[in-house]
Image (cartoon, rainbow, N blue to C red):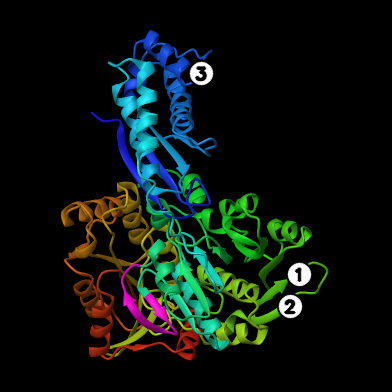
Amino acid sequence: MTSLVELRVLEGPNLYFPRAAIKLTLDIGSIATAPTDRAVRFARRIGLRNARPGEPGTGFRQRFALRAVERLVRAVAAESGTARLALRVRSSSDANQVVVAFPWRNRERAEAMGKAVADVIDHLPSTDVDGLVSAAAARVAESPRGPVPQTITPKVPVVAVTGTNGKTTTSRMIAHIARGNGLRVGWSSTDGIYVDGELVEAGDYSGPSGAGRVLAHNVQLAVTETARGGILLKGIGLTRNDVSVVTNVTADHLGQQGIDTLDQLAEVKAVVPRITRRQGWAVLNADDPRVYAMRSVIVARPWVFSRDPDSPGLREVLGEGGRATTVIDGWLCVLQPGADPDPLIQLVDVPMTLAGLSRFNVENSLAAASASLAMGIPRDVVIEGLRTFRPDPKHNPGRMNFFTVPVPSGAVSVVMDLAHNEAGLEAMIEIMNGVRAPGRRLVLGLGAVGDRTDDLIEMLGEIGARDSDVVAIGHKQQYLRGRSVAELDALLRAGAARVGVTEIESYPTELECLAAMVAQAEPGDVVGLMCHAERQECYDWLATHGGTADTPETLAAKVRLATA
């Protein structure tokens, strides 16, 4: 079996370096199990002259293997003509695998070096150690140099938005505000590439290609939604950004691409503010400890946001000369060192916040206002943008969309949202409660995509069943991602059963689930649908059945009734 598990070319800033890099995943089993005398000879050949490898299969040998891989890469690089090489070596969740990363300037030669290192490890158990490294270095030296990195250095200002939840809404709000300032804005997202408010390329462009596609158009400002998958698989497509935003870090996509914990996920997200230019601003959530800790890796100026005006994070950043955005007496306010708070707008006048009841969208609004002001957009334009951005299909498709749908003897509210993880679902239920009239029910359509962990899918079932009055399952056929419908159904039901809910109807599609829930809803009920696969079909169904998108005035009336 070859030791080369994966060789990945990262085209731009990444988890390991702020520039293009090669990432190797290597199986170190041959080092871990090699006879002790051979391990000693190998150590001496690569420059570890006083190393004590330990016995095969022990923890000491595992630690030796990590050091040995690092020295092996350096030895091959040096003997093939690379005098200095930045290098990162990390253990992985698999004790027999390590991750090695190093920057590259010539693609083919860098790939050749990765393969040569793996070849040495492959032949370690049965071949003369001394000749292995020399032969590997010679192959690298003789290989073609190949192309150089194509990472783009932007010529227009760039706002880069990342985070587990809220990055799509926040990036859309920033783009909306900037357009209000007369700028031709391009932005990339999970829905596609938009230029000046028009969709020009459909598809998921939250990866590295999205930034390049936006900049290929004649824009004056680029807003890029940056997801963790693109950072891990290809790197970021730009060398830098002018303003970065990190909304939060919560459990999602764990167990994929070697990211198993929230701390590891936060490290991936931190790549975005890490490449914000020195004179730019890194906008960070002071209420999220992992996001707030990213101040330690940035060279940009910090601008934090918090719903709590007495947050220690705000005081600390202001004391260091940074800026902050918060909520004081119901007003969204900007704070600067040595100055009185600047009240921009009351939360009741920001439609996305549901009069301040939606905590997540209060944070998204704080983040969007901070980033817009950091870009130099005038104060009055930012205020108008916050006032006119609405939770409807036109401004924020697929994210917290509110509708009123007629039913016999009255009407029901319908809320559609992606809600693809625990925090997202809790936020969706929060806003459903925000418009529920006294004595009325929450009717929830659950769903999950197949590439989440069993625990996360079960937790969605538990949260949905616990916090709603009626729950159903609407499956996402296009997003099974290796699972069967039956498997997803069983996991969601298992979660619901933990809170005593066992009577659950299942529907093969989101659309059928929506139709069934509206059919059983009573006047004043709130129907919620976790919608990902059939957004437009659900919009069309609602329109056909007399549904209309709620205006800010309608939403305000629903909130007043709910809190009466």
Left or right, 299 with respect to 227, comes to right
User: Do labels 1 and 2 touch, CB within 8 Å?
Assistant: yes
Q: Earlier in the sequence, mark 2 or mark 3?
A: 3
From the viewer's perspective, is the residue at label 2 or at label 3 nearer? 3
Magenta span contains residue 194:
yes
Given the image, on which type of amino acid does mark 2 rest?
A: Asp
- SS at mark 2 in the image: strand
Q: Which residue is mark 3?
A: 48
Q: Label 3 neighbourhood size at 10 Å, few (<14), some (14-19), many (20+)?
A: some
Magenta-tinted stretch: 193-204
Residue 51 sits above or below residue 349 on the image: above
| Real-space Cα separation, disc 2 to disc 3, in angstroms | 61 Å
User: Do labels 2 and 3 touch, CB within 8 Å?
Assistant: no
Q: Is residue 379 visible?
A: yes
Question: Which residue corresponds to the image point at 79% horizontal and 67% vertical from the top-left?
Answer: 337
Q: Residue furthest top?
A: 37
Quadrant housing residue 503: bottom left
Q: Position of residue 122 (x, y in %)?
A: 29, 25
Q: Which of these two is toward me, 312 or 121?
A: 121
Q: Position of residue 319 (x, y in %)?
A: 78, 59
Q: Earlier in the sequence, mark 1 or mark 2?
A: 1
Q: Which residue is mark 2?
A: 342
| Real-space Cα separation, disc 3 to disc 1, in angstroms | 53 Å
Question: Which residue corresponds to the image point at 56% horizontal and 73% vertical from the top-left?
Answer: 157
Q: Which residue is mark 1?
A: 336
Given the image, on which type of amino acid does mark 1 rest?
A: Gln
Left or right, 81 with respect to 285, comes to left
User: Do labels 3 and 1 touch, CB within 8 Å?
Assistant: no
